[in-house]
Image: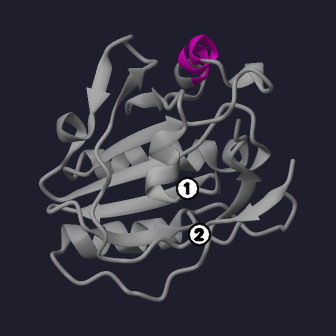
Amino acid sequence: MSETKSNMTELGSTAPDFKLLNTIDGSYTSLDECKSDIATVIMFICNHCPYVLHVNPELVKVANEYSAKGISFVGISANDVENYPQDAPELMTTHAQEVGYEFPYLYDETQDIAKAYGAACTPDFFVYDKDLKLVYRGRFDGSTPGNGVEVTGEELKAALDALVENKPVSTEQNYSLGCNIKWK
């Protein structure tokens, strides 16, 4: 595990399009199919990263709570499964069921989508407004494994609350910290 900071992609950039394998149901899912009229949260996550595992229970709660408010969530795993077989698509399916992901969990086999988004670590969060313009990128909250800070999702939730209330999202944002994406 190599602790890595997110790249902090430029705010206002447009969400790169994708069509990726949805490991939940075996279909291919596009950005257009996932897009919300309020906000779309693109999360680079994976099965084995201790940083993702640390936030997973609260992440599931936040995704369920804000999905009910009209925000869509998409998880994408781009890890090299040849060297990290625990992140293989069939295990993504099992993992999603075990932890309760109600959102699409997509596999970026070529890693092109992770590169297009500027993803660097897991978890890495990108929030796009109704026009698919980036309004938030960074961390879930200040908690990491072993730092003693409670997992709340407060930073991601603050951005989502602003969008639900049709208010501007604060540009004071903190980088995410996690395992590096396992590049090929």
Task: Give the residue at x 26% y 40%.
Answer: 31
The answer to whether residue 130 is above or below residue 17 is below
Prevailing secondary structure of the magenta residues: helix
User: Which of 98 and 44 lies nearest the eye of the viewer?
Assistant: 44
Scheme of image coloration:
one colour
Residue 150: quadrant of the picture: bottom right
- The amino acid beneath tag 1 is Ala
Horizontally, residue 104 falls left or right of residue 8, namely: left
Horizontally, residue 171 falls left or right of residue 76, namely: left
CA separation, marks 2 and 1?
7 Å
Residue identified by numbered label 1: 119
Residue 141: quadrant of the picture: bottom right
Is label 2 in a helix, a strand or a loop?
A: loop
Confirm whether residue 92 shows in the render. yes
Disc on res. 7:
2
Is label 1 in a helix, a strand or a loop?
A: loop
Q: What residue range appears in magenta?
A: 89-95
The answer to whether residue 145 is above or below residue 160 is above
Instruction: Report x, y in % for residue 139.
Output: 57, 66
